[in-house]
Image (spheres, helix red, strand yellow):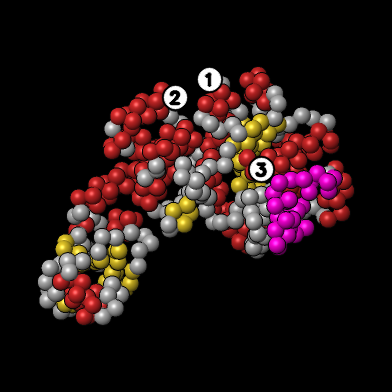
Amino acid sequence: MDLYDELAWRGMVYDATEGLRDVLARETLTGYAGFDPTAASLHVGHLLPALSLARLQRHGHSPIAIVGGGTGLIGDPSGKSVERTLLTVEQVESNVAGIRGQLSRFLDFDTPSHPARLVNNADWLTRMSAMEFLRDVGKFFTVNAMLAKESVKRRIESEDGISYTEFSYSLLQAYDFLMLHDRYGCTLQVGGSDQWGNIVAGIDLIRRVRAAKAHGLVMPLLTTSSGAKFGKTEGGAVWLDPELTSPYEFYQFWFNADDRDAARYLKFFTFLDEAAISVLEAASAKEPEKRHAQRELAREVTRLVHGATAVQEAETAAEKLFKGDLSAMSVAELLQIFPNVPSCDLASVATGWLVPELLAAAGVASSKSEAVRLVKGGGISLNGRRIADEKERVTREHAIEGRLFVIRKGKKDNFLVRLIG
């Protein structure tokens, strides 16, 4: 299966320029995708363009990941209903540095034959004067065409409108394509379907200025089967940085995918072939309760982003949590499992605490009397053990590794108490 056919089978071709299939089949191309450094980490939504570059490289083409150190100072209006908050130069530079390391998980920058490249468009955009921009780029675009862009029209019709800064974004991205064409012979840009207008602008600029042909391919914007935005949870975005989203949370995000989405995600986010995914689809249809597709999805993507050890640790922690024996878990495991729950630091007391005292001090209950009612109602567990006696005393010896209490109120509300001193 050639690259275009593979991308089409995986559902990753929303639109493409005419003739791209034939060009990919007979030529070795250099193609690029852009990554906006508006945060210190990429999130799971960036996996689709990152893996499209990885597939490009695996088929013998040369990928370029461009980190928008220049355009990140402006902000892309595509898909946005309001003006972005401008970042400082220092924020953008810090974010660019974080993203570089994450992209190396997917792309091979060291292979001698067709290595991946990582470039920063600040290298040329921040060195261009306003007069150069107007003369060398602006004169090739009509305002009529720019106003016709769907993202621009939506913003013009909104109450806040669109600034000249964001209105000019597509010209900057078009200039990126031209620079990559001139420096590296890049003739292909890939991105989400909301980038089609920006990509076409770059193709037109290359044709007008260099009399050369370039191509574009856009992938569908992802939503879940329920219509929700992909990559969002109750806790916010699912980040690739393990400090922002723990490997356990990351694994669970994929493992909890809806049955209707699992096979589609396997095609998008793994390198499993058609036969392997078909087997998983059949197994899931036969035994949906065992979540065969979701389990393999979680394993493959977590391995790709965080490594094999993270997969093993996530599955071990999940098994212990399922059994309900929190006391058998390490503090490190518990902090991965409960990274966003309410927590507090509590000074250790030699005599320990009566359970109501601990609950009140930790903020689990608003008062000792409320804590007593919770215990009598069977609503409190400590380190996975139901507390039945409100007169029970707990000490540091009862804490996990002598450092941590996990308190559960009711069926869902968890609290962490870290002992200090």
- For label 2, the SS is helix
Q: Position of residue 359 (x, y in %)?
A: 24, 74
Q: Which residue is mark 2?
A: 274
Q: Earlier in the sequence, mark 3 or mark 1?
A: 1
Tally of numbered tags: 3
Q: Are marks 2 and 3 in contact (CB under 8 Å)?
A: no
Give the vertical position of 88 relative to 172 (above or below). below
Q: Position of residue 412 (x, y in %)?
A: 29, 60
Principal SS element in the magenta part? helix
Q: Are marks 2 and 1 in contact (CB under 8 Å)?
A: yes
Residue ID at (88%, 48%): 135
Q: Which residue is mark 3?
A: 195
Residue ID at (80%, 39%): 205
Whether residue 229 appears in magenta in the rendering, the answer is no
Label for residue 361? none
Stretch of the chain drawn in magenta: 142-168
Q: Earlier in the sequence, mark 2 or mark 1?
A: 1
Whether residue 161 appears in magenta in the rendering, the answer is yes
Q: Position of residue 24 (x, y in %)?
A: 64, 24
Q: Which residue is mark 1?
A: 1
Residue 99 placement, left or right of 308: right
The amino acid type, in three-letter code, at marker 1 is Met
The amino acid type, in three-letter code, at marker 3 is Gln
Residue ID at (66%, 31%): 16
The amino acid type, in three-letter code, at marker 2 is Glu
How far apart are the two marked residues, 2 and 1, measured between alpha carbons? Answer: 10 Å
Residue 327 placement, left or right of 118: left
